[in-house]
Image: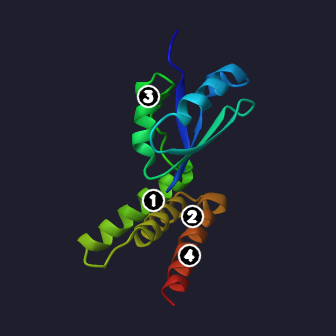
Amino acid sequence: MSVPRASIVHRMPGRVRLRVPEKRDDATYFGELESALRGVDGVAEVVVNPTTASVLVHVELEAEPVLRAAEALGLFEIAEEPPRGTPIAHLYERLREADRRLALRTEGRWDLATLGFYALLGGSAVQLVRGKFMPAGATLAIQALGLVLKQAERRR
């Protein structure tokens, strides 16, 4: 029989919440897990919910030694934690970092908003030269103007 995989859903000082999805609705497993975890050094309290496949472990000090002990007992295997946040939040953080680096390397003369402005303005000019004022040229020009206005508002 294979060891079920558990993922850390939430962690904060004094507690950690796990999910063991493959054991959802398995009251026997969660009952045995609760009993076994209560016997691990450092565990203050255990609350299980087989319906949601959830395990809440209150710890006296740190959660990590408790989790490692539970793994060593074969109660579960901690799955790799997924990146935190949504893909949009991750992209936003990457763009903020790129903006910071660009400003640092150019001694504050350039940032992503300025680059975006010139890229949109250039794209607008290309569309205008091609005779495509509506909608492509106008849209790019409006977006470029929007960047300038947002940047000016942010600097106030």
Q: Please, what secondary structure does the residue beneath circle 2 have?
A: helix
Residue found 47% across the figure and 39% down from its top: 81
Circle nearer the viewer, 4 or 3? 3
Amino acid type at circle 3 is Glu
Label 2 – label 4 distance at C-alpha: 9 Å
- The numbered mark, 1 or 3, whose residue comes first in the sequence reads 3
For the residues labelled 2 and 1, say whether their Cβ atoms are less than 8 Å apart.
Answer: no
What residue is pinned by disc 2? 140
- The numbered mark, 4 or 1, whose residue comes first in the sequence reads 1
Circle nearer the viewer, 4 or 1? 1
Residue 83 x %, y %: 48, 44
Residue 128 x %, y %: 54, 63
- The numbered mark, 3 or 2, whose residue comes first in the sequence reads 3
Circle nearer the viewer, 3 or 2? 3
Q: Residues within 10 Å of mark 1 (few under 14, many from 20)?
A: few
- The numbered mark, 2 or 4, whose residue comes first in the sequence reads 2
Label 3 – label 2 distance at C-alpha: 56 Å
Q: Please, what secondary structure does the residue beneath circle 1 have?
A: helix
Nearest the eye: 96 or 147: 96
Q: Where is residue 115, by image quadrant?
A: bottom left
What residue is pinned by disc 1? 93
What residue is pinned by disc 4? 145
- The numbered mark, 4 or 3, whose residue comes first in the sequence reads 3
Residue found 51% across the figure and 24% down from its top: 75
What residue is pinned by disc 3? 71
Amino acid type at circle 1 is Glu
Q: Please, what secondary structure does the residue beneath circle 4 have?
A: helix
For the residues labelled 4 and 3, say whether their Cβ atoms are less than 8 Å apart.
Answer: no
Residue found 48% across the figure and 86% down from its top: 155
